Image (cartoon, grey):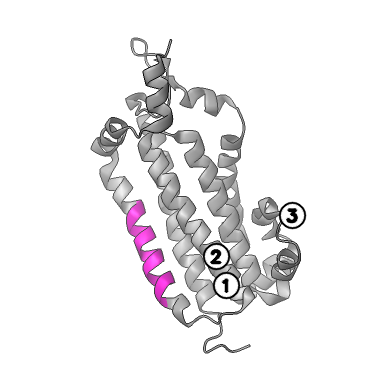
Amino acid sequence: MFSEQQIRETALQDNPASRQAFLAKHKSQTNKVIGQLVIFYRDFGEATKSWPRQPRYVTVAQFLHVAGNSLATSLNLLVAGLIVPSGNLVRQYAEAMSMAMLCSVPSVGVFDAFNANRATYAVHKSVDRVLKKENARALRESLGLDAESWKIFKKSASVFDAHSHSTILAIGSSLRFGKKSAAMILGPEYDPKKFKFYRIELLRRFNGAATLVNVFRAIDATVPRNNAA
């Protein structure tokens, strides 16, 4: 079915043809996602220079970077034609951004719990944890959280739970669609029959990056400067 050369190329090489085919159809939408990430890292890099070097704020900065890096790498994989691992990283983005929010507000208590046991703390529950009644109240007062908007974000983020399991999505991403072109796919490939799917995925990453910019700015406004307590 697949030759040894094909398997070696899949394991050891990138697929420029897949990227070129993707960008030929989706370059503008891809650049919009990149633009939002540029804004995030520009603001993040400048603002965090004056953040106190205390464990809480160092951790918040780390989670914010994990969120940004996860989105950037997810976009890379989507353009390359690797749909499932790309979705896994969007899930990681959502969890990291949630942890940044939760850790930034002292009264929530999440940073203390996480810092006490970083190896086993249930980070994967952080998106849900934002909506716990007492947490949502504290985040609303500190960061301006809109619980209803977060419910929409949570629903959108939950789409990527399926990327972590061998579901119909995993099967679909391994097949080329079309009556005449249908076939199994080995490694990354651009499938023109998935045009609408790619556009939806790009929009999700654009919205994710724009949300990250807004969350960062809300957190930044609460961070003490000049090494204040």
Query: Which residue does the numbered mark 3 point to in the structure image?
Result: 120
- The magenta segment is 33-46
Residue 68 image offset from top left, x and y in percent: 46, 58
Secondary structure of the residue carrying tag 1 is helix
In the picture shown, does residue 8 fall above or below 40?
A: above
Predominant SS of the magenta segment: helix
Residue 93 image offset from top left, x and y in percent: 53, 53
Query: Which residue does the numbered mark 1 point to in the structure image?
Result: 58
Per the model, the C-alpha gap separating discs 3 and 1 is: 19 Å
Quadrant of the image for the N terminus? top left
Query: Which residue does the numbered mark 2 point to in the structure image?
Result: 62
Residue 142 image offset from top left, x and y in percent: 61, 76
Image side of residue 105 versus residue 33, left or right: right
Secondary structure of the residue carrying tag 3 is loop
**Most distant residue in the left direction:** 24
In the foreground, 38 or 6: 6
In the picture shown, does residue 129 fall above or below 137?
A: above
Which class describes the residues within 10 Å of circle 1: few (<14), some (14-19), or many (20+)?
some
Q: What residue is drawn where x is 61% and y is 58%?
A: 148
In the foreground, 219 or 185: 185
Q: Is residue 127 visible?
A: yes
Instruction: Give the amino acid at mark 2.
Output: Gln
